[in-house]
């Protein structure tokens, strides 16, 4: 690696703070993905990739397991269906039974629309709030926001971040690893609350 | 989201103009919310807000005097109010179709238009929900519609299609709003990161929930988006089916037919696509989005309008056939009366707008003609309003007792509330295009050739031969 330390490096964050993460910036999804593969192969676990849009194949490059969201949604679907059956049965069969249009209080076919709608409603809540829960969002304070360059992540730049909390992290080794992936720039982000 | 490029053998084109970069998309979409509004926006906004004011006054008067200020009478107990309700719900359906159904079918061209189609859904459903709410007469009792424990120990009737409607439209509104918001999170983060003043940074920062474009987040996010699309697809089919049950489960000739659910769903998609077309063409001209919303989009939308318009035409014909084939004299009378009775003018307006006008789209020159697309989209909106009016009013105005036969006349309050609901819709829509990214930036970036990790800038020989998409 002849060009080691040719990559510009800056430190950002409040004064006197300890490093929270190292951030490397790339121009293309391909460069970013190769970097993610290298970091994964080096055995890091507390690292992340930041891209303006989901990049196909990145989950594999990072070695991520499949999302667990489907299980949350399936649970909520069963809960929604049960809630609908319970509500209709309680309201029209037990608490306040009355006959309309000659149909008996317990008329199963008439259950269908409301059962369907509540199943969908609960599942949708499960999908949205389950997703936010798994992602631990909303989280408006994160050390990564100390970096001004990182603002371009929602525009056209691609980033790899390695947390200093990672057991494999050491300042010069991690930096050398990231430099070997030829980023545009490396930043050490410091924060009071890593 | 891989990108395999357009298949030129079957005439596919690039989804956006070749040479579009990530940065260009961010700029083109974000600048609308950052620059001062163009004069055209202000003119439309002031007009829309005025109509919303009229809506407020008309509804205030309605609450003060009661539903007698409408032209509704016996036997025409449902008239413009329910016509407007069904019309607005139907318009909403195209947004969900574009965002969910076309997503599941991997129709990537939807990415340029799904955001404002979804916004349109939400605003249309808000307008729709207004009408049953004010139609109950004593609005302070509107909560009777919901299954809430109360001091009278009574519960709503879960065997009633009107109650199913409450659940269907309520769920539809909630899920559409969630779906829309989930799609917005990354784009609100873009606006946050571009903000130059602290108010924008605070507001967009708050709304984007601290999104940091993390791939660990994208993984769950994409899964959530796919699940929401999979949930919305049967949901959108169920909503207009349930709306049609309001009619089909009654024993009214002209309403009591099994074709209603699919017929209503096709009509809903038809009218919604027409409304998306109207709004899209206006937004494209006012905010100069020609590179992102291309002629390909207009043409594909027009093909769907042609297809659904033809399905609707088939349904009209099939209703007549069944009326004759059933041998039921009341059914036969209702349909003959529809086409040749006192409301023949409404019936033939509907046929001309909905069945005849989209047939022009068999010709490529006509379906790629922007002014004509605009005119036909307006025709379809009018025709689909008349479809609901024809179904509701012509079926009711000559009921089983000939002594109560009459002719429905709308009152000025009917007209003011309808026009006012258009004002409300356009007010919300104009605020949306001014303050929220009207095109899904993150999603549009992901369909660019550069978005693929296997794309090499110096190795794009297939792109040189690609037919550039025609931009207007």
Image (cartoon, helix red, strand yellow):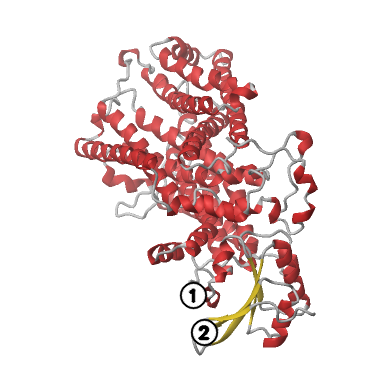
Same-chain status of marks 2 and 1: yes
Give me the C-alpha separation between circle 2 and circle 1: 10 Å
Residue B390 against residue B149 in the figure, above or below: above
* Mark 2 crowd level (few <14, some 14–19, many ≥20, 10 Å Cα): few
The disc numbered 1 marks a residue on which chain? A
Residue shown at the point (55%, 75%) measured from the top left: A144
Residue A63 visible in the current orientation: no
Q: Which mark is residue A85?
A: none
- Residue hosting label 1: A141
Residue shown at the point (41%, 53%) measured from the top left: A95
Tag 2 and tag 1, C-beta contact below 8 Å: yes
Q: Residue B39 placed where, x, y %?
A: 37, 41
Mark 2 or mark 1, which has the lower sequence index?
Answer: 1
Q: In front: B471, or B206?
A: B471
Q: Residue B77 placed where, x, y %?
A: 33, 27
In the displayed image of the protein, which residue is found farthest to the left? Answer: B64
The disc numbered 2 marks a residue on which chain? A
Q: Horizontal placement of B170 versus B69: left or right?
A: right
Q: Residue B269 placed where, x, y %?
A: 55, 34
Residue B283 against residue B438 in the figure, above or below: above
Which image quadrant is residue A20 in? bottom right
Which part of the image, by quadrant, shows the C terminus of chain B? top right
Q: Horizontal placement of B431 versus B212: left or right?
A: left
- Residue hosting label 2: A193
Residue shown at the point (55%, 18%) measured from the top left: B356
Q: Residue B467 placed where, x, y %?
A: 72, 37
Q: Secondary structure at mark 2?
A: loop
Q: Secondary structure at mark 1?
A: loop
Residue shown at the point (76%, 80%) measured from the top left: A43
């Amino acid at each position: 690696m002849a060009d080691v330390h040719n990559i510009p490096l800056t430190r950002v964050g409040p004064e006197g703070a300890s490093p929270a993460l190292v951030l490397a910036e790339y121009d293309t999804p391909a460069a970013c993905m190769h970097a993610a593969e290298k970091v994964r192969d080096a055995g890091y676990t507390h690292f992340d990739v930041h891209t303006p849009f989901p990049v196909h194949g990145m989950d594999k490059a990072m070695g991520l397991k499949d999302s667990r969201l489907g299980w949350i949604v399936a649970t909520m679907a069963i809960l929604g269906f049960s809630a609908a059956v319970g509500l209709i049965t309680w309201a029209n069969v037990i608490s306040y039974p009355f006959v309309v249009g000659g149909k008996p209080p317990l008329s199963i076919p008439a259950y269908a629309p409301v059962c369907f709608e509540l199943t969908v409603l609960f599942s949708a809540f499960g999908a949205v709030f389950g997703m936010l829960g798994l992602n631990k969002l909303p989280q408006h304070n994160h050390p990564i926001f100390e970096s001004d360059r990182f603002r371009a992540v929602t525009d056209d730049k691609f980033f790899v971040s390695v947390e200093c909390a990672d057991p494999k992290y050491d300042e010069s080794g991690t930096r050398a690893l990231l430099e070997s992936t030829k980023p545009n720039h490396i930043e050490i982000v410091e924060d009071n609350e890593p | 989201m891989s990108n395999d490029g357009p298949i030129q053998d079957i005439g596919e084109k690039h989804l956006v103009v070749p040479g579009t970069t990530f940065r260009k998309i961010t700029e083109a979409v974000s600048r609308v919310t950052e620059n001062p509004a163009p004069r055209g926006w202000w003119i439309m906004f002031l007009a829309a807000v005025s109509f919303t004011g009229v809506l407020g006054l008309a509804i205030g008067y309605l609450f003060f005097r009661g539903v007698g200020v409408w032209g509704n009478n016996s036997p025409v107990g449902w008239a413009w109010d329910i016509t407007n309700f069904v019309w607005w719900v139907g318009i909403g359906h195209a947004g969900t179709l574009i965002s969910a159904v076309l997503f599941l079918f991997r129709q990537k061209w939807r990415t340029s238009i799904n955001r404002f189609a979804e916004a349109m859904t939400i605003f249309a459903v808000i307008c729709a929900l207004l009408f049953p709410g004010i139609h109950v007469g004593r609005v302070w009792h509107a909560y009777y519609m919901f299954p809430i424990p109360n001091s009278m120990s009574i519960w709503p009737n879960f065997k009633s299609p009107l109650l199913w409607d409450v659940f269907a439209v309520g769920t539809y509104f909630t899920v559409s709003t969630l779906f829309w918001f989930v799609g917005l999170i990354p784009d609100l983060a873009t606006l946050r990161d571009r903000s130059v003043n602290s108010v924008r940074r605070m507001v967009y920062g708050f709304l984007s929930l601290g999104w940091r474009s993390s791939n660990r987040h994208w993984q769950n996010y994409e899964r959530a988006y796919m699940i929401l699309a999979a949930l919305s697809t049967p949901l959108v089919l169920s909503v207009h089916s349930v709306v049609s049950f309001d009619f089909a489960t009654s024993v009214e000739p002209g309403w009591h037919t099994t074709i209603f659910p699919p017929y209503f769903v096709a009509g809903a998609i038809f009218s919604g696509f027409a409304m998306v077309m109207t709004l899209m063409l206006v937004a494209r001209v006012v905010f100069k989005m020609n590179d992102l919303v291309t002629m390909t989009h207009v043409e594909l939308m027009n093909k769907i309008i042609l297809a659904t318009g033809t399905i609707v035409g088939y349904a009209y014909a099939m209703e007549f056939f069944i009326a004759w084939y059933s041998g039921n004299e009341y059914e036969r009378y209702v349909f003959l009366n529809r086409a040749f009775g006192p409301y023949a003018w409404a019936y033939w307006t509907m046929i001309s707008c909905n069945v005849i006008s989209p047939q022009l789209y068999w010709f490529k020159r006509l379906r790629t003609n922007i002014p004509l697309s605009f005119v036909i989209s307006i025709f379809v909106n009018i025709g689909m309003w008349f479809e609901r009016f024809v179904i509701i009013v012509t079926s009711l105005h000559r009921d089983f007792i000939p002594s109560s036969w009459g002719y429905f006349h709308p009152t000025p309050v009917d007209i003011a509330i309808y026009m006012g609901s258009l004002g409300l819709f356009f007010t919300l829509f104009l605020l949306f295009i001014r303050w929220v990214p009207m095109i899904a930036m993150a999603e549009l970036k992901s369909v660019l050739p550069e978005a693929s990790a296997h794309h090499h800038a110096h190795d794009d020989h297939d792109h040189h031969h690609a037919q550039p998409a025609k931009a207007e």
